[in-house]
Amino acid sequence: MTALLAILRRDFVLAFRSGGGWFYALFFFAVFTALSAIAFGPSLSALAIAAPATLWLAIALSVQFSAADLYENDIRDGSLRVIAAEQPSLLSYWGAKVCVLMITAVVPMIATAPFFLTMLGLSFGQGVILAIILFMGAPALVFIAVMTAALASGLRAGGLLAMIIAVPFSVPVLVFAVRASKSVLASSGLVTPESLILCAISLFMAVLTPGFTIAALRVSLE
């Protein structure tokens, strides 16, 4: 726990000292949503139909964008090697990276989603409902982004490679996330089969990805 808190404190300090890098995900999310609203045209019905898919695609791309260089500074300055030598397991390091990505990138997007979704023909109340659904599925996207960033760490154009690797893992999340969003908007209830499956996928990714992430990081140090 002490190691986790130390890593969290260091990463938060670096995130807010790096010239606003933590803000890039929110900026990309806002621009993507606004451009999508313009592309779909002035029809509110067409915008409302496309809103769930647009929302989740924006979230997925923004998370991957934020995680592109998640480990690069640690590898470059040797801190990851020191942490790996001092800690018997990198699980606390993985947990710290997940928490940092969730708090600095995902939480601001979820908090502002109801406002941006009004540009896509939804009411503010519907936007709040979709924001709650984001809390169910966004962790799965974060776990995937943390893992794929580790798989591509230390490689040239690693960010692009991480996005390509993330596609097959993200597709099931996006499919059930969009279906859950549409079913929740249609039924006005948060507990639907699709939303329960989405929660299950997030839990599954929480169990599946740490081992692959840690193994990839140890390989990158060799």
Image (cartoon, grey):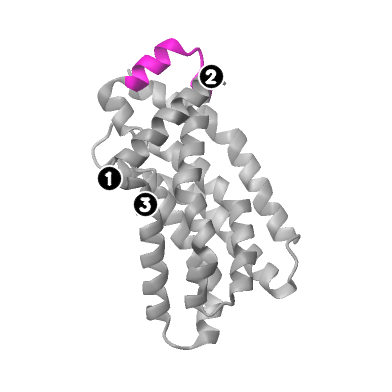
Q: Residue shown at 39%/43% (left/top)?
A: 67
The range drawn in magenta is: 79-91
Q: Residue shown at 48%/68% (left/top)?
A: 54
Q: Are marks 2 and 1 in contact (CB under 8 Å)?
A: no
Residue underneath mark 2: 2
Q: Is residue 163 visible?
A: no
Find residue 105 and report its horizontal and vertical position in percent: 44, 49
As measured in the structure, the alpha-carbon distance from the residue carrying label 1 to the one carrying label 3 is 9 Å
Q: Residue shown at 42%/39% (left/top)?
A: 148
Which quadrant would the C terminus be assigned to in this image?
top left
> In the displayed structure, does residue 155 sit left or right of residue 97?
left
Q: Is residue 157 visible?
A: yes
> In the displayed structure, does residue 193 sit left or right of residue 46?
right
> In the displayed structure, does residue 194 sit left or right of residue 21?
right
Q: Quadrant of residue 104?
A: top left
- On residue 19, which mark appears? 1
How would you classify the magenta stretch by its main secondary structure?
A: helix
Q: Nearer the viewer, residue 193 or 84?
A: 84
As measured in the structure, the alpha-carbon distance from the residue carrying label 2 to the one carrying label 1 is 28 Å
As measured in the structure, the alpha-carbon distance from the residue carrying label 3 to the one carrying label 2 is 28 Å
Kind of element beneath mark 2? helix
Q: Amino acid at mark 3?
A: Phe
Which quadrant would the N terminus be assigned to in this image?
top right
Vertical placement of residue 188 versus 161, above or below: below
Vertical placement of residue 99 versus 93, above or below: below
Residue underneath mark 3: 23
Q: Are marks 3 and 2 in contact (CB under 8 Å)?
A: no
Farthest residue toward the left? 156
Q: Amino acid at mark 2?
A: Thr
